[in-house]
Amino acid sequence: MSSRPDPGSERPLHGPVQSFDLEAEVGRLREEGAWHRGRRNSITLRKGEGMNMVLVVMKAGDRLEEHAAPGPFSLSVRDGRIRFEAAEAVVEAGPEALLTCDTGVRHTVVALSDAAYLLTIVGGRLRAETSEHPSSTS
């Protein structure tokens, strides 16, 4: 999985005002070969000025192994269901749920069904393959 802008687009990753049709973006991610060949896909919507936003789609049964984000973050479930495991907390979340977590908290994300969520990391640095979302492709 990679975090990258829309492949056919020259759109900037940050700017004074940005607008996204999240439903259309989720649909596009689920049409790409990466989704059909793997278990997840993502696109970086914004990167810069201390805020990174990544839209992630996961197939049922996919698991992001334990990891930590480089800054505090929020995870907003758009559709499907996930299980978020951090320290002593286990939260099952569905559409319109919002989870937040402090910097450095180790956590795991499991897709209980095909799911889409918007991840916003504040103050951290996002790499092409983030510590937030290690690749599961073999």
Image: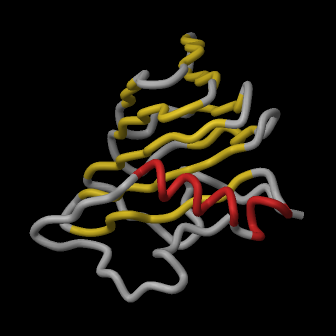
25 left or right of 33 in image? left
How many marks the image carries: the answer is 0
53 w.r.t. 106: above or below = below
Taking the spot 48% from the left edge, 32% from the top edge, the residue there is: 77
Residue reaching furthest to the left? 16
Q: Picture coordinates of residue 105 (x, y %)? A: 47, 32
Quadrant in the rendering for residue 114: top right
Q: Picture coordinates of residue 117 (x, y %)? A: 51, 40
Q: Picture coordinates of residue 51 (x, y %)? A: 26, 57
Quadrant in the rendering for residue 30: bottom right
Q: Nearer the viewer, residue 36 or 76?
A: 36
49 left or right of 93 in image? left
Q: Nearer the viewer, residue 75 or 20?
A: 20
Quadrant in the rendering for residue 73: top left
Taking the spot 69% from the left edge, 44% from the top edge, the residue there is: 58
Taking the spot 59% from the left edge, 24% from the top edge, the residue there is: 84
Visual colour scheme: secondary structure
Taking the spot 48% from the left edge, 35% from the top edge, the residue there is: 78
Q: Quadrant of the C terminus?
A: bottom right
22 w.r.t. 99: above or below = below
94 w.r.t. 76: above or below = above
Q: Quadrant of the N terminus?
A: bottom right
111 w.r.t. 10: above or below = above
117 left or right of 34 in image? left
Q: Picture coordinates of residue 8 (x, y %)? A: 51, 86
Residue reaching furthest to the right? 138
